[in-house]
Image: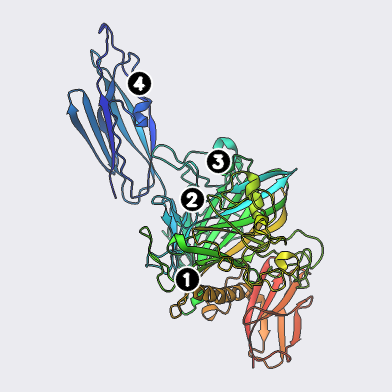
């Protein structure tokens, strides 16, 4: 930890006084914000006039010069104060403060200010030291070490550097920053929650800027809120320990379990139910001493809640959605599975806390790819895999500006929409395909169940800052963000197939996707219209390599008041350690995306011997699903006690391809799979909000 050095200079200016009466100076209490455990040194010289805020707002009614006389501290941290005399009329007062190790809370220093009148007069004030929670957490269980902060993903704003390290421990990174965007319309006005690198008004010593916490009544927002200005990090081992010990006399849960943000304060306008939890005694109230505990995915998870009030509008100046976003980032540790060990996941749920309904709503993941060195990158998308990605433009990723490159084995970094936004209900089981309301990369299409369809990645685009062509450039207005989210340039023109994607470069066929390569053989992105070149990539378009920002999006959907929408993303890293070349990492990334999509479709039951299964039902529906015989030859019997009339039985093969799907209305179902080859399959039952899978073997 470093000391905070506050250097306060006071230049004593001789003033004309009658000396018949001298009034005391006026000292005002002040607040400064101290980083958790490791504060950054601050040095300010006054050049004759005090400039630190807690001196700036002190004053003397007679116009005398003022300066600090002494300071006092009675807390448990380290403190020192030193008077440094520069000249008879210029002083520096050095205050050193270091908070106690792991301390979080409000500390204080009292100081005495005096003037240079006759007689000398004094006043006292208090500096309140808000020692903050750590403003980030590291998701670092597997081969990825990713930083998640209060205002951005995968970025270190303190040093303005990348913070998605992979392989872990190498100081090599693939992303500089990322953030979620969402925009919708109401009466043709665009409402927005979209942030790129973080706040446009960064926090300082005396100002804290944050979007943390749930939506609440305006009078209850604080500059710093100890309950909400933080992230919650927890592991499955910590939860297991709690499950085994909560009933013991004298047991106290660890801090993250004790302070899990399960509930808001409804008297302040906050939603009552917030972070998910397992309610051990079914009383509806989170209480760890009743055996309740956080409900997480993965073996390590980070939870965060934020809103767009008084924050996102600083980017565009336009109206915000009044949305509240919850995310859970999670990872699994399975070194034997290179796909799962090189992937992290983010589940987002966005709540519309306004009284408006938004149409034409889209959600996007904005990503600033820096594949090692930032100056030689390309981007592309894989339509069939619902993925966009960054990769090196040439065969060697060199070091640059203090950033380590990946050298002769450059990787690719993918962002996959495992589940996109839910399609608006229409009473129809929309099919896989390229017709309206159909898709080739979504979830729930053509499975026999109406109104359970989720879009996949419905668009991909990239832009440059500063602009490289007409319609390009950093978004400024709400309309700019909305245009980018649904495949339009800033000038309002639709993206077109070929060249750089803008009609000024010669293209004429509208498209949803920039640079799909050969991943869209059905021409889903162009509405079934065949377009050339057949292999349209940024590399083939002869674009100059450089720093790349990509935006994958999902939608449209109608975002009704007091409703929510959920999506799931996977960040998949691919690198070939035997084959050189810029495309070698892309191939590995695509193979891993295939595995991750298969695992997700079957609730991870095949990963690491089934140890990573993440059934979404709190009451463990797996105990109600039985499959026999297993292994089987031709016929298979499935027993499941359905809770409603919308239960779907689906069979997937090992690579996640759907083999069959049907509704089940009885407890026992007999299937004949004699036409299928021997191998591993997965039985998945979807019953309302419950979804459970079992692995079966045909022999």
Q: CA distance from mark 4 to mark 2?
A: 36 Å
Q: How far across and how far down the image is residue 386, in percent?
A: 63, 68
Q: Tags 3 and 4 in contact by the CB under 8 Å rule?
A: no
Residue 269 shows in this picture? yes
Q: Earlier in the sequence, mark 4 or mark 1?
A: 4
Q: Tags 2 and 3 in contact by the CB under 8 Å rule?
A: no
Return the residue at label 2.
150
Q: Earlier in the sequence, mark 4 or mark 2?
A: 4
Q: How far across and how far down the image is residue 131, in percent?
A: 38, 44
Q: Quadrant of the C terminus?
A: bottom right
Q: How far across and how far down the image is residue 90, in percent?
A: 22, 26
Return the residue at label 1.
411
Q: What is the number of the mark on residue 314?
A: 3
Q: What is the number of the mark on residue 59?
A: 4
Question: What SS does tag 3 mark?
Answer: helix
Query: In which quarter of the view is residue 71 placed?
Result: top left
């Amino acid at each position: 930890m470093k000391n905070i050095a506050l250097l306060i200079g006071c230049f004593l200016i001789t003033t004309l006084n009658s000396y018949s009466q001298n009034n005391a100076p006026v000292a005002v209490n002040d607040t400064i914000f101290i980083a958790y455990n490791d504060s950054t040194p601050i040095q300010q010289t006054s050049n004759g006039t005090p400039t630190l805020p807690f001196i700036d707002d002190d004053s003397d009614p007679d116009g005398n010069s003022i300066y600090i006389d002494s300071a006092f501290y009675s807390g448990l941290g380290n403190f020192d104060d030193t008077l440094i005399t520069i000249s008879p009329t210029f002083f520096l007062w050095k205050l050193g403060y270091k908070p106690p190790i792991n301390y979080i809370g409000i500390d204080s220093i009292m100081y005495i200010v005096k003037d240079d009148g006759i007689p000398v007069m004094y006043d006292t004030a208090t500096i309140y030291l808000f020692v903050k929670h750590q403003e980030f957490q590291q998701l670092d269980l597997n081969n990825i070490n990713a930083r998640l902060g209060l205002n951005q993903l995968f970025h270190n704003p303190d040093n303005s550097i990348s913070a998605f390290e992979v392989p872990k421990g190498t100081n090599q990174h693939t992303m500089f920053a990322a953030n979620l965007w969402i925009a919708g319309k109401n009466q043709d006005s665009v409402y927005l929650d979209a942030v790129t690198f973080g706040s446009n008004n960064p926090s300082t010593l005396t100002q804290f800027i944050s979007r943390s916490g749930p939506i609440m009544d305006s009078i209850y927002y604080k500059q710093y809120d100890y309950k909400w200005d933080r992230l919650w990090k927890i592991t499955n081992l910590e939860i297991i320990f709690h499950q085994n010990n909560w009933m013991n006399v004298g047991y106290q849960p660890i801090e993250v379990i004790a302070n899990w943000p399960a509930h808001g304060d409804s008297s302040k306008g906050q939603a009552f139910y917030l972070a998910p939890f397992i309610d051990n005694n079914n009383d509806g109230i989170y209480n760890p001493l009743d055996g309740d505990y956080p409900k997480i995915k993965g073996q390590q998870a980070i939870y965060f809640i934020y809103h767009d009030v008084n924050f996102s509008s600083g980017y565009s100046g336009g109206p915000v959605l009044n949305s509240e976003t919850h995310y859970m980032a999670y990872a699994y540790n399975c070194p034997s599975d290179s796909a799962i060990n090189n992937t992290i996941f983010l589940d987002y749920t966005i709540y519309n806390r306004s009284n408006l309904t938004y149409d034409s709503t889209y959600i996007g993941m904005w990503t600033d790819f820096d594949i090692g060195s930032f100056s030689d990158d390309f981007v592309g998308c894989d339509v069939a895999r619902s993925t966009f990605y960054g990769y090196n433009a040439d065969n060697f990723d060199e070091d640059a500006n203090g950033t380590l490159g990946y050298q002769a084995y450059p990787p690719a970094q993918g962002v996959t929409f495992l589940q996109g936004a839910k399609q608006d209900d229409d009473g129809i089981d929309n099919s896989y395909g390229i017709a309206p309301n159909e898709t080739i990369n979504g979830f729930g299409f053509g499975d026999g169940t109406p109104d359970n369809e989720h879009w996949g990645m419905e668009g991909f685009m990239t832009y440059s800052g500063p602009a490289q062509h007409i319609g390009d450039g950093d978004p400024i207005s709400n309309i700019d963000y909305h245009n980018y989210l649904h495949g339009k340039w800033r000038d309002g023109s639709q993206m077109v197939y070929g060249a750089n994607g803008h009609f000024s470069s010669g293209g004429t066929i509208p498209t949803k996707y920039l640079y799909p390569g050969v991943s869209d053989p059905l021409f889903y992105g162009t509405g079934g219209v065949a377009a050339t070149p057949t292999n349209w990539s940024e590399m083939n378009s002869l674009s100059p390599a450089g720093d790349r920002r990509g935006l994958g999006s999902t939608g449209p959907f109608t975002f009704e008041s007091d409703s929510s929408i959920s999506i799931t993303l996977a960040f998949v890293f691919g690198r070939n350690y035997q084959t050189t070349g810029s495309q070698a990492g892309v191939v590995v990334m695509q193979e891993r995306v295939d595995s991750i999509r298969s695992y997700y479709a079957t609730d991870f039951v095949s990963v690491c011997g089934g140890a990573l299964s993440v059934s979404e039902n709190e009451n463990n529906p797996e105990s109600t699903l039985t499959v026999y015989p297993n292994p089987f030859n031709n016929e298979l019997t499935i027993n499941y006690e359905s809770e409603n009339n919308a239960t779907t039985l689906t069979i997937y093969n090992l690579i996640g391809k759907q083999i069959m799907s049907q509704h089940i209305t009885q407890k026992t179902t007999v299937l004949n799979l004699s036409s299928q080859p021997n191998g591993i399959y997965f039985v998945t039952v979807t019953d309302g909000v419950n979804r459970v899978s079992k692995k079966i073997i045909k022999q």
